[in-house]
Image (cartoon, grey):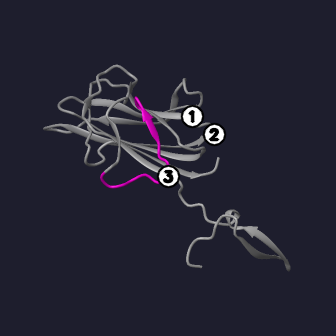
Amino acid sequence: LASEPADTDEFLVSDAGTLKRIDYSLIKGGGITEADQWRFTTDFDSGTTTPKFITANWERNDTQFDKIGTGMSESSGVFTFPSTGIWKVDFVCSVYHASNDARVDVIIYYTANNSSYAEAALSYNGIRGQLNGAKERTTIVSAILDIDDTSNDKVKFGLEDLDNAVTVEGSSTYNFNSATFIRLGDT
């Protein structure tokens, strides 16, 4: 074949000696049908009020990658999935503090009702013990989520337990802080 068969093209298979027909749509490989990556573009001061949701300055990665499939949509830091399925969500968060020790929890928040958010993944990030200069740390949190309702299942990202304000770093040319979304398979 010079090109991929149509979903309705049929193949013959032998089932213990009995020939049967099967549509290509039932035997083709799935592969990744959705992958997307977003980053925030501007440094911001976290403050100490928690939880601190990251609600502004998100952009789709436009320098190294273009999405596969439809891609995520984002509004005020809330991300909506384009299709149902089992999704892997990764959040990379880099923070620094100029002088004091600090603690920050990096969190993926999830809702199944488009209203009440709970922690889907959390990592503690302690900025301590470095002498002379800024104290920097990067934390990665991951969650695998069963998205069965694209109207109600959503995620957002944030920080908690800020004993000192930290600077969350951003860039519009590379991924300093980013969220990656990959659809792994059907729900």
Q: Amino acid at mark 2?
A: Asp
First of labels 2, 1 by sequence position = 2
Q: Quote the CA–CA distance across marks 2 and 1.
A: 7 Å
Q: Earlier in the sequence, mark 1 or mark 3?
A: 3
Looking at the rendered structure, the secondary structure element under dot 2 is loop
Instruction: Name the kind of residue labelled 1 in the image.
Output: Asp
Measure how far apart labels 2 and 3 are at the Cα level.
Answer: 18 Å
Q: Mark 1 and mark 2 in contact (Cβ < 8 Å)?
A: yes
Q: Nearer the viewer, residue 119 or 74?
A: 74
Q: Is residue 12 above or below residue 146?
A: below
**Three-letter amino acid code of the residue under disc 3:** Gly
Task: Please give left or right for residue 59 compared with residue 73 in the image.
Answer: left
Residue depicted at 70% across the width and 63% down the height: 26
Q: Residue 1 location in percent, x, y?
A: 59, 79
Main secondary structure along the magenta-highlighted residues: loop
User: 140 or 59, which lies in front?
Assistant: 59
Residue 185 lies, with reference to residue 8, above or below; the image says: above
Which residue is the site of mark 3? Answer: 69
Q: Nearer the viewer, residue 163 or 167?
A: 167
Packing grade of label 3 (10 A; few <14, some 14-19, many >=20) is: some
Name the residue rendered at 70%, 65% in the picture: 8
Stretch in magenta: 63-77
Q: Residue at x 55, y 27 (%)?
A: 114
Residue depicted at x 24% and y 34%: 43
Residue 148: which disc?
A: 2
User: Which residue is denoted by mark 1 in the rendering?
Assistant: 153
Q: Cα distance, mark 1 to mark 3?
A: 19 Å
Residue 160: x and y in percent read 39, 27
Q: Is residue 40 magenta?
A: no
Query: Nearer the observer, disc 1 or disc 3?
Result: 3
Q: Quadrant of residue 14?
A: bottom right
Which callout, 2 or 3, points at the residue further toward the start of the chain?
Answer: 3
